[in-house]
């Protein structure tokens, strides 16, 4: 693919758009697509500043098996972008840092800049990926393939048997007619039986593969870093967990059917070769030409379909947000603006689909036109053979019937097969990316086990900032050289203004995010060396807005502890001050609470979340504004419950209301990502002016 232009703003924008679209179409990672856009734009703008706008450039893009290659050639004097004096050195660093090969050379009065972007999935990798799942159902797959091979042989024999029947009719030999008819009947019956068993066992393979892929994909999605999930949105994961897995699993059934039909047409070609080799050469040439047209169509369909699916992911994400945020949308009176935005995304996705189909139909129209010309030429060739080379009319009828079938159905089948093959590759690309691509980084844990956790937590010179998914933006430092120790079995609290880094501390303790420098210790062990069970099996978080599932109260609790007893369930609900509310419900513990706990009040959701964490008897409990939605009376009950179970646990709280943490063993006052001061409530009132002002302000409001 090439883009020709001059160093004008219009041509630069055109090149930038083509560069990004090319990366998206071939499945480059989202961050890589952005880097391509930035690199292309920066390079061309810098040359625009240095050269005349009439200077020409050529932008070439091509795909290799495992990478996308970009080359920009610009006429003019030598300008090396890799030197420090040039202003886009920083953007170059994005490519050098990620080992994206970047080169510059000057030849024949032309600057040539080349860079590459990796593609993390290939056709070979996709086939290996699919075969991994097929092997799990090897027995059924072998039976299906064996049945299909028998069917293939019958499909090759069927057209030749049919031809024999027509010839027998022409020769008027009764015995030959009966014999060929019986032979045709036997071949047809064997073909039917074989394809029946083929479908039965391929269907079993399909169901097994679909279940296995969906389970593995859910497992992989659960291991993806939280920051990535939050950034990419739910639509992407919904599409790949549903549509793409179904497409991948269905491909085995569809391709089995289409391969069987293809071999039927191969049988027809063999019959052509036996009956008339010259006409076989003509037919084979015509079919090959139509195949080339179909290959071009399906190649274009692959890239266009990838663009459409990405647009559809955004629509799915917005629909998910519309459902989850419907209450906020209504109370903010934002129905119209949200409607306009989602309508825009829907129209954009549908337009991508229309563009894809229009391109496909243009290629189909070309194939049809070529087919019409080819059948006209075929009739003329056969007529010439009858008149000049004494071809029997019966033979001409057989050839015409065969060619009519090949010219229509065979080409259509080939197109469907190639289209489905591309669809299979695209679905495999998207699923493999979710599992293997660095675009979706996975959480990593150590292998060290920690037994009998006491609950001491220590931050040692911890620094942290959230990564920016836009490389143009510099990340803001959240925690700065933070140091503190929370003794085992104590109750600690973090207080401070919004945005000072309190919730980030919790995310680092649970390894939802990983420190950029410094170390976090649990009972003296670096948490990066601990296995998942040692860390998250001993720590739980009750957040300000806990998520509850669209299940009964009993089922929500059993997700934490499947073998819980009735007594345990009632005990933790009593401790969390939610038991009386549950007993007042018509179905009590079997009451369905709705998606996100929509049928419960804010306070009820928080108390049920507290009961849920008590059920598993975690040694360390993090309460992130967990009492913010409670009235004063219920808050006192929760405080009493916390005091009841805190004797052998480490309790860490985040609170805006200082009244909820004044009895803590130690309070850390956080300001601008640092521990400004620490001590008991009375100690901080004496020595920390910022804490004293915060407490006095709260007392004044009350």
Image: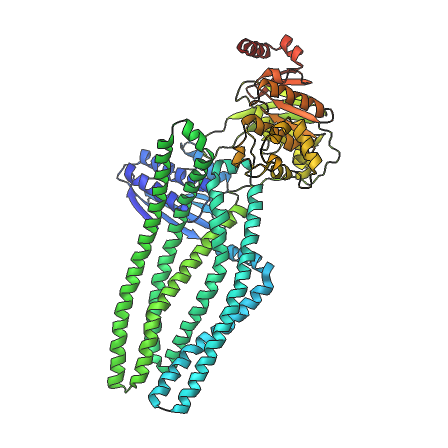
Looking at the picture, tell me which residue is in the foreground, 493 or 559.
Answer: 559
Q: Position of residue 276 (x, y in %)?
A: 35, 81
Q: Position of residue 567 (x, y in %)?
A: 71, 35
Residue at image position (54%, 33%) is 597
Q: Is residue 535 above or below residue 674?
A: below
Q: Is residue 266 above or below residue 35?
A: below
**700 sits left or right of 523 in the view:** left
Looking at the picture, tell me which residue is in the foreground, 565 or 398.
Answer: 565
Q: Quadrant of the C terminus?
A: top right
**604 sits left or right of 31 in the view:** right
The answer, for residue 531, to whether it is visible in the render is no
Q: Position of residue 145 (x, y in %)?
A: 53, 68
Looking at the picture, tell me which residue is in the foreground, 16 or 126.
Answer: 126
- Farthest right residue? 452
Q: Is residue 42 above or below residue 121?
A: above
**Quadrant hosting residue 415:** bottom left
Looking at the picture, tell me which residue is in the foreground, 594 or 487.
Answer: 594
The answer, for residue 287, to whether it is visible in the render is yes
Q: Position of residue 285 (x, y in %)?
A: 34, 71
Counting every numbered tag in the picture gives 0
Q: Is residue 174 above or below residue 542?
A: below
- Farthest front residue? 586
**322 sits left or right of 561 in the view:** left
Residue at image position (53%, 34%) is 596
**Quadrant hosting residue 696:** top right
**Quadrant hosting residue 56:** top left
The chosen color scheme is rainbow
Residue at image position (72%, 38%) is 449
């Amino acid at each position: 693919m090439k883009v020709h232009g001059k160093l004008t703003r219009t041509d630069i924008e055109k090149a930038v758009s083509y560069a990004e679209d090319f990366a998206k179409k071939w499945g480059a990672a989202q961050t890589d697509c952005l880097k391509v856009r930035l690199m292309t734009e920066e390079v061309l703008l810098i040359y625009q500043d240095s050269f005349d706008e009439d200077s020409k450039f050529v932008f070439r893009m091509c795909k290799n098996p495992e990478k996308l290659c970009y080359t920009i050639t610009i006429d003019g004097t030598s300008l090396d972008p890799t030197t420090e004096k040039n202003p886009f050195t920083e953007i170059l660093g994005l490519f050098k840092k990620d080992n994206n090969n970047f080169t510059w050379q000057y030849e024949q009065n032309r600057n040539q800049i080349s860079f590459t972007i990796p593609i993390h999935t290939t056709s070979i990798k996709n086939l290996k990926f699919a075969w991994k799942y097929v092997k799990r159902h090897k027995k059924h797959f072998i039976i299906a393939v064996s049945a299909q091979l028998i069917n293939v042989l019958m499909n090759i024999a069927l057209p030749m048997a049919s031809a024999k029947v027509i010839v027998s009719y022409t020769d008027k030999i009764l015995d030959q007619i009966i014999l060929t008819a019986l032979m045709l009947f036997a071949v047809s019956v064997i073909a039917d039986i074989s394809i029946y068993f083929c479908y039965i066992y391929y269907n079993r393979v399909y169901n097994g593969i679909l279940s296995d892929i969906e389970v593995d994909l859910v497992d992989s999605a659960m291991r993806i870093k939280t920051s990535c999930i939050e950034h990419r949105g739910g639509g992407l994961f919904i599409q790949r967990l549903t549509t793409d897995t179904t497409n991948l699993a269905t491909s085995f059934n569809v391709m089995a059917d289409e391969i069987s039909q293809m071999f039927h047409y191969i049988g027809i070609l063999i019959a052509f070769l036996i009956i008339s080799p010259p006409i076989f050469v003509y037919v084979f040439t015509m079919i090959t030409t139509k195949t080339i047209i179909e290959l071009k169509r399906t190649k274009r369909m692959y890239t266009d379909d990838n663009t459409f699916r990405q647009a559809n992911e955004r629509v799915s994400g917005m629909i998910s947000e519309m459902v989850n945020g419907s209450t906020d949308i209504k109370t903010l009176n934002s129905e119209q603006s949200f409607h306009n935005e989602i309508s825009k995304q829907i129209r954009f996705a549908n337009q991508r689909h229309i563009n894809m189909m229009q391109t496909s139909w243009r290629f189909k129209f070309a194939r049809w036109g070529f087919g019409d010309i080819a059948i006209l030429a075929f009739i003329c060739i056969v007529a010439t053979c009858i008149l000049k080379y004494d071809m029997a009319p019966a033979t001409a009828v057989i050839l015409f019937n065969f060619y009519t079938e090949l010219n229509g159905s065979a080409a259509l089948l080939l197109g469907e097969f190639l289209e489905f093959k591309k669809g299979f590759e695209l679905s495999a690309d998207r699923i493999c990316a979710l599992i293997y691509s660095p675009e979706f980084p996975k959480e990593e844990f150590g292998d060290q086990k920690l037994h009998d956790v006491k609950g001491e937590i220590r931050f040692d010179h911890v620094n942290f900032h959230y990564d920016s998914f836009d490389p143009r933006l510099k990340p803001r430092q959240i925690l700065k050289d933070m140091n503190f120790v929370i003794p085992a079995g104590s109750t600690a609290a973090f207080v401070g203004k919004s945005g000072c880094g309190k919730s980030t501390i919790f995310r680092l303790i649970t390894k939802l995010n990983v420190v950029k420098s410094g170390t976090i210790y649990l009972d003296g062990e670096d948490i990066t060396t601990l296995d998942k069970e040692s860390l998250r099996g001993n720590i739980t978080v009750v957040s300000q807005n806990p998520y509850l599932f669209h299940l009964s109260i009993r089922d929500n609790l059993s997700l934490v502890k499947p073998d819980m007893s009735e007594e345990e369930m009632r005990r933790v609900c009593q401790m969390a001050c939610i038991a009386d509310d549950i007993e007042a419900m018509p179905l009590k513990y079997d009451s369905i609470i709705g998606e996100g706990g929509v049928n419960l009040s804010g306070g009820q959701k928080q108390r049920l979340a507290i009961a849920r964490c008590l059920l598993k008897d975690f040694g360390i409990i993090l309460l992130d504004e967990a009492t913010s939605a409670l009235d004063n009376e219920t808050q006192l009950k929760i405080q009493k419950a916390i005091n009841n179970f805190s004797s052998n646990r480490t309790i860490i709280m985040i609170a805006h209301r200082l009244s909820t943490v004044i009895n803590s063993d130690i309070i850390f006052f956080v300001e601008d990502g640092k521990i400004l001061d620490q001590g008991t409530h009375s100690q901080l009132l004496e020595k920390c002016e910022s804490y004293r002002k915060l407490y006095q302000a709260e007392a004044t409001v009350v």
